[in-house]
Amino acid sequence: MAQNTGPMSVRRTSFVDRMIGAAELDSSIYREVEHDHEANWQAIGVVLLVSLASAIGGARHGGGGFVFGFVVALGAWLIASGLVLFIGTKIMPEKQTEADWGQVMRCMAFAYSPAILTIFAIIPFLSGVIFFGTWVWVIIATVIAVQEALDYTETWRAAVVVLLGWIGFIILRSIYLSAYHAFK
């Protein structure tokens, strides 16, 4: 479980406990992974598990769904983290905002934890509800993660950064898909 070896140390919560805490929208988990530089591998693990779940959930749409789901989840993490870091630290910082790539990527990765449930989207009659529900949940978790990663005191600011980041991601994804289909 969790251990604390001193007043300045980072609590060491297990990988599974961190994923559950992140899915439960526990801001202390995001604060913990923000400051735990050793959690990079855990963050990558979350993204890989969610990518796999998303790929399996999208597999009923054919082999392309499997590959597409896997690639989109990995790419979304990297692109969204970069957009959040840029928007949050360069365009909309608060006085105390201090973040680096690793902090944002770790927090963003754990915010994807609820999306592990997309594995159940392989069930045809549940597919739409599961994808919609988990991504709404991920967006809420992402707002909490961004607020912690960027040291924001105001939730609305984190929500705007997330919204702008998702708009930026959708634009980049649309450009990519247009290019992909043009050369297909």
Image (spheres, grey):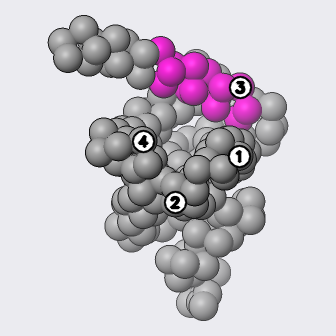
Q: Which residue is mark 3?
A: 160
Decide which of tag 4 and tag 1 comes sooner along the chain. Answer: 4
Q: Disc 2 marks which amino acid?
A: Ile
The reply to whether callout 4 and callout 1 are in contact (CB within 8 Å) is no
Q: CA distance from mark 4 to mark 2?
A: 13 Å
Q: Which residue is mark 1?
A: 129
Which region of the structure is painted magenta?
158-172
Secondary structure type for disc 1: helix
Above or below — where is 99 with respect to 32? above
Q: Nearer the viewer, residue 183 or 10?
A: 183
Mainly helix, strand or loop, the magenta region?
helix
- Image quarter for residue 180? top left
Report crowding for label 3: few under 14, some 14 to 19, many 20 or more residues within 10 A (C-alpha).
some
Q: Residue 31 in the image: x percent, y percent?
A: 63, 61
Decide which of tag 3 and tag 4 comes sooner along the chain. Answer: 4
Q: Which mark is residue 61?
A: 4
Query: Which numbered disc, 3 or 1, marks the residue closer to the eye?
Result: 1
Above or below — where is 144 with respect to 116? above
Please state, as top left, top right, bottom left or bottom right, where the C terminus lies in the image: top left
